């Protein structure tokens, strides 16, 4: 768990409840992976994963971003701290980018 | 400040910079002898008197209504400050252009709030969308509100004060790894729109993302912008205006002048000066000096790309 942010102070019950709901989901598979968007960069920019892995992108910028792989997946606009997850069920190379800032690109290699 | 002659070659760079140090909220342009000239920021008395004889118009940009992060927790408030300054101008400009990113997340309430504040200027406003205005799933809020009578994703042209104005959209169909994009359909329309126009007609092109290449590493440019510039190159006077990069930049290339406006919401770093083009956090006391738009004096013989970095308050 992250350190509780200011919004959570005074909402101990909500926090515990949220943790109870979130923990099983985020720890469902040991090999599920995360990509962070920081400073207009996908980190890590390239990932090698196994078929069946779920990748979760989190936008940690003050500016909204998207995660788009043409014909494969497309997130909604991710505001600050919003997340998008996609489970890769087929092997292959998935190039993706941010449709708002197309110079931001990344790659998921699924084997 | 009165008595400065911005066109005079003898004016030292320092003096010119002083002329640009008024805090301001929009660029005021005037058309004299068929050539648009930026006069200064709108709350300067000099700009007001100089504006009186000819047609003048105003540019504001990147209001990002809905943005509430530390760089500026109240983007709606600073937009309102900008509009209040416009309302305080002694001489009203003929109209205003807004070069996009009216809202931050394309929410209906953000468009409503922006409209409520901007309409207080009682000026006609000609918009082009920024990428932040096209974030709703069906991309309909911008178009329903501002897209009437426009073509494609929202491009159009109109004439005012002897000048032909062309609003372009370069924020759709962006390709991975690429820059802003106009697309074949819009370029064909542009070529057609200019066909038969006298070469002496002054042209003002405006779009959200710079049509010229400012800094490709941050996506600050338009992939097929060169095509658009080819079409306008033969005209005697061409002014290309944009927003998106939240800072003042100017470049003069032959008869074409490029000018980038400030944001009314938050500043962004100079190209390469930070790890990303994200909002720049500055002390509260300094924020307003980095918003609005400063004026730049045209120097027709300067070919270099000028990054104007001046304190606007004081
Ligand atoms: Cu923008």
Image (cartoon, rainbow, N blue to C red):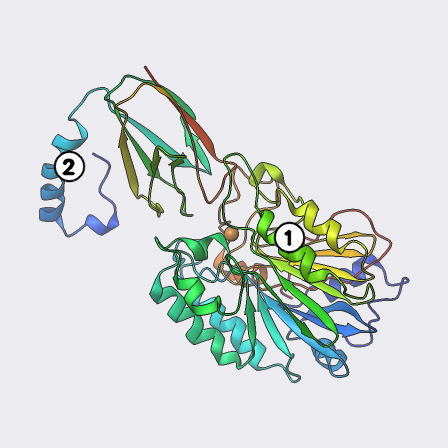
Residue B290 found in image quarter = bottom right
Query: Which numbered dot is residue A22?
Result: 2
Residue B260 at x, y percent in the picture:
65, 56
Say whether mark 1 and mark 2 are on the same chain.
Answer: no
Estimate how packed mark 1 is, as few (under 14), some (14 to 19) or many (20 or more) residues with alpha carbons within 10 Å. Answer: few
Residue B166 at x, y percent in the picture:
65, 63
Question: In the current view of this chain or complex, which residue is farthest to the right?
Answer: B10
- Above or below, A109 against B4 in this view is above
Q: What residue is at 66 percent from the left and 68 percent from the top?
A: B22
Estimate how packed mark 2 is, as few (under 14), some (14 to 19) or many (20 or more) residues with alpha carbons within 10 Å. Answer: few
Report the front residue among A27 and B314: A27
Position of A13 with respect to B184 (left or right) is left
Residue B249 at x, y percent in the picture:
68, 53
- How far apart in space, not on screen, are marks 2 and 1 (Cα)? 52 Å
- Above or below, B10 against B211 in this view is below
Report the front residue among B253 and B189: B189
Query: Which numbered dot is residue B188?
Result: 1
Check the picture and name the quadrant holding the C terminus of chain A: top left
Report the front residue among B156 and B66: B156
Label 2, secondary structure: give it.
helix
In the image, is the residue at mark 2 within 8 Å of ligand 1 by its beta carbon?
no
Q: Please, which chain is the residue tagged with disc 2 on?
A: A
Check the picture and name the quadrant holding the N terminus of chain A: top left
> Is there CB contact under 8 Å for labels 2 and 1?
no
Label 1, secondary structure: give it.
helix
Q: How many numbered markers are drawn?
A: 2
Q: Please, which chain is the residue tagged with disc 1 on?
A: B
**Residue B108 visible within the image:** yes
- Above or below, A106 against B35 in this view is above
Q: What residue is at 29 percent from the left and 40 percent from the top?
A: A83
Residue B154 at x, y percent in the picture:
52, 61
């Amino acid at each position: 768990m992250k350190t509780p942010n200011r919004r959570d102070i005074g909402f101990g019950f909500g926090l515990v409840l949220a943790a109870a709901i979130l923990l099983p989901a985020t720890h469902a598979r040991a090999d599920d992976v995360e990509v962070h968007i920081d400073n207009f960069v996908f980190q890590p920019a390239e990932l090698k994963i196994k078929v069946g892995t779920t990748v979760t992108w989190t936008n940690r910028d003050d500016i909204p971003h998207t995660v788009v792989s043409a014909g494969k997946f497309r997130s909604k606009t991710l505001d600050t701290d919003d997340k998008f997850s996609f489970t890769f069920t087929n092997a292959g190379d998935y190039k993706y980018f941010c449709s708002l800032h197309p110079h931001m690109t990344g790659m998921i290699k699924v084997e | 400040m009165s008595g400065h002659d911005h066109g005079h070659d003898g004016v030292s760079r320092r003096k010119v910079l002083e002329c640009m140090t008024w805090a301001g909220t929009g660029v005021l342009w005037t058309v004299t002898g068929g050539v648009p000239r930026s006069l200064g920021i709108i709350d300067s008395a000099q700009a007001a008197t100089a504006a009186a004889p000819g047609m003048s118009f105003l540019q504001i940009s990147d209001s990002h209504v809905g943005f509430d992060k530390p760089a500026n927790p109240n983007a709606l408030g600073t937009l309102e400050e900008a509009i209040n300054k416009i309302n305080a101008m002694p001489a009203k400009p003929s109209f205003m252009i807004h070069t996009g990113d009216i809202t931050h997340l394309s929410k209906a309430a953000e468009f409503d709030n922006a409209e409520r504040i901007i309409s207080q200027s009682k000026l006609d406003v000609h918009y082009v969308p920024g990428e932040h205005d096209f974030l709703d799933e069906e991309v309909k809020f911008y178009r329903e509100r501002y897209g009437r009578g426009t073509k494609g994703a929202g491009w159009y042209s109109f004439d005012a004060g002897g000048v032909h104005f062309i609003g372009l959209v370069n924020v759709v169909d962006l390709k991975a790894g690429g820059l802003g994009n106009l697309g074949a359909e819009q370029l064909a329309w542009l070529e057609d729109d200019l066909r038969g126009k006298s070469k002496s007609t002054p042209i003002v092109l405006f779009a959200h993302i710079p049509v010229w290449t400012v800094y490709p590493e941050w996506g600050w440019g338009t992939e097929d912008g060169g095509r658009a510039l080819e079409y306008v190159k033969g005209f005697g006077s061409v002014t290309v205006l944009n927003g998106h990069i939240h800072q003042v930049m100017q470049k003069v290339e032959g008869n074409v002048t490029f000018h980038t406006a400030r944001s009314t919401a938050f500043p962004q770093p100079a190209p390469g000066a930070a790890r990303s083009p994200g909002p720049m956090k500055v002390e509260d006391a300094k924020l307003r000096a980095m918003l609005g738009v400063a004026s730049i004096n045209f120097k027709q013989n300067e070919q270099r790309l000028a990054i104007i970095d001046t304190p606007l308050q004081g």
